[in-house]
Image (cartoon, grey):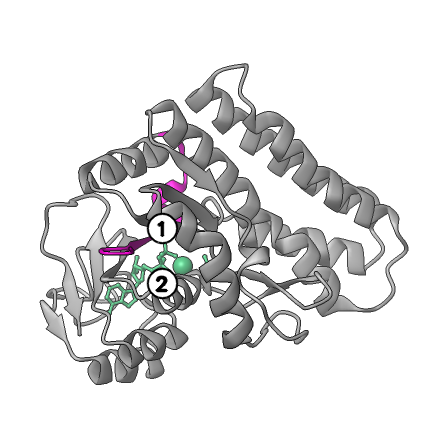
């Protein structure tokens, strides 16, 4: 029986360095009970860096693309060394993800920009999930790494793919529920999915919140929490305004309106699937996990 599945989403800021990932470990340990699905975004600004790889490839500047990719490889290996030491199973998995892109860059560019974009940019989330998963295992957490591309089925509208809900539900039932029912923790990727032909797709920039909502819906989660660098949803973006205050509570409708008018704290597509199943959304601070955050219900 799935009694109390929770879904946690950690964005790029929360996993941007070794200390960030250790903090994720503390938040997961604090959760204590089992049946937790964890959705992670790419580390820090990795997605922006991968977009530069795509741009270089599309300009047929292959050397430039390779060297940008090598920089990312370096960053991910350095982080892994800091967290996990020299001998972790994570290195081989990270390498496999990089090799896929290195091969693609050796193919001549065929003008299918959006397709190439998704094949390249999607590795950001694969990489971060590999590192987070390996780190949680070192804490003794029985986490399973699940490839979101085997769960989230989409059409082939690359860079802005639409979800095939029926197949996604089926795949979530087949691949996620058994692990969660066994009392396990699942680590998977935000932002990415795959077509019926197994081609990788992405759901649009900042789409990891939406991924977490898709899984929350399919798993009938009791609650979904997104862990941010802010105490919750604020009256305005603190990057541009002073004197902002935290909102303790929002209705689904208010949250949809806020994201629609551009509040960049929650991806606009996130709320609807949650509302359809009356799943509460918590927006919480990864700096202050005990803080009350914002509840959307
Ligand atoms: P993630 O790490 O999950 O990708 P984001 O960077 O996308 O997180 O979202 C958090 C950021 O959203 C905050 O740092 C803040 O600058 C911005 N933001 C914009 N509008 C708001 C708002 N109304 N309330 C809180 N944060 C906001
Ligand atoms: N990594 C992706 C992005 O930066 C998805 C996300 O973070 O939500 O857009
Ligand atoms: Mg984001």
Which image quadrant: the N terminus?
bottom left
In-image side of 64 versus 49 (left or right): right
User: Image quarter for residue 276?
Assistant: bottom left
Q: Which residue is drawn at 33% across and 68% down?
A: 266
Do the residues under discs 1 and 2 have CB atoms within 8 angstroms?
yes
170 vs 192, nearest the viewer:
170
Give the crowd class for mark 2: few <14, some 14-19, many >=20 residues within 10 Å: many
Q: Residue 253 at what x, y percent from top left?
A: 23, 85
In the picture of the structure, the residue carrying the numbered disc 1 is 37
Q: Which residue is drawn at 53% across and 60% down?
A: 151
The answer to whether 275 is drawn above or below residue 92 in the figure is below
Sequence order check: which comes first, mark 1 or mark 2? 1
Range of the magenta residues? 1-18
Q: Residue 149 at what x, y percent from top left?
A: 59, 57
Whether label 1 lies within 8 Å of ligand 2 gets the answer: no
Q: Residue 233 at what x, y percent from top left?
A: 20, 66
Q: Residue at x 78, y 54 (%)?
A: 57
Q: Which residue is drawn at 38% across and 52% down?
A: 11
In-image side of 131 versus 161 (left or right): left
Q: Is mark 2 on a helix, strand or loop?
A: loop
The answer to whether 117 is drawn above or below residue 189 in the figure is below
Front tag of 1 and 2: 2
Compute the Cα span from label 1 to label 2: 9 Å
In the picture of the structure, the residue carrying the numbered disc 2 is 219
Ligand 3, what quadrant? bottom left
- In the rendered image, residue 12 lying in the magenta stretch gets the answer yes
- In the rendered image, residue 276 lying in the magenta stretch gets the answer no
150 vs 240, nearest the viewer:
150
Which image quadrant: the C terminus?
bottom left
- Residue 204 appears in the rendering: no
């Amino acid at each position: 029986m799935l009694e109390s599945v929770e879904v946690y989403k950690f964005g790029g800021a929360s996993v941007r360095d070794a200390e960030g990932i250790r903090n994720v470990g503390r938040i997961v340990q604090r959760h204590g009970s089992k049946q937790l699905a964890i959705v992670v975004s790419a580390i820090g600004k990795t997605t922006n860096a991968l977009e530069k790889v795509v741009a270089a490839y599309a300009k047929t500047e292959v050397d430039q693309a390779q060297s940008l990719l090598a920089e990312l490889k370096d960053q991910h290996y350095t982080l892994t060394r800091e967290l996990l030491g020299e001998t972790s199973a994570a290195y081989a998995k990270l390498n496999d993800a990089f090799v896929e892109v290195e091969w693609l860059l050796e193919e001549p560019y065929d003008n299918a920009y959006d397709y190439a974009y998704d094949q390249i940019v999607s590795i950001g989330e694969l990489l971060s999930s590999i590192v987070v998963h390996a780190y949680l295992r070192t804490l003794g957490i029985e986490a399973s790494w699940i490839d979101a591309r085997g769960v989230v089925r989409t059409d082939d509208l690359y860079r802005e793919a639409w979800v095939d809900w029926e197949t996604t539900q089926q795949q979530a039932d087949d691949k996620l529920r058994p692990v969660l029912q066994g009392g396990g923790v699942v680590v998977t990727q935000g932002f990415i999915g795959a077509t019926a032909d197994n081609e990788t797709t992405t759901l649009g920039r900042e789409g990891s919140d939406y991924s977490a909502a898709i899984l929350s819906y399919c798993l009938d989660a009791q609650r979904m929490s997104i862990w941010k660098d802010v105490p919750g949803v604020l009256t305005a973006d603190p990057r541009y305004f002073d004197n902002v205050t935290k909102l303790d509570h929002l209705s689904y409708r208010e949250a949809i309106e806020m994201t629609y008018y551009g509040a960049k704290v929650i991806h606009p597509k996130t709320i609807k699937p949650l509302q359809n199943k009356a799943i509460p959304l918590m927006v919480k601070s990864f700096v202050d996990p005990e803080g009350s955050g914002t509840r959307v219900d």
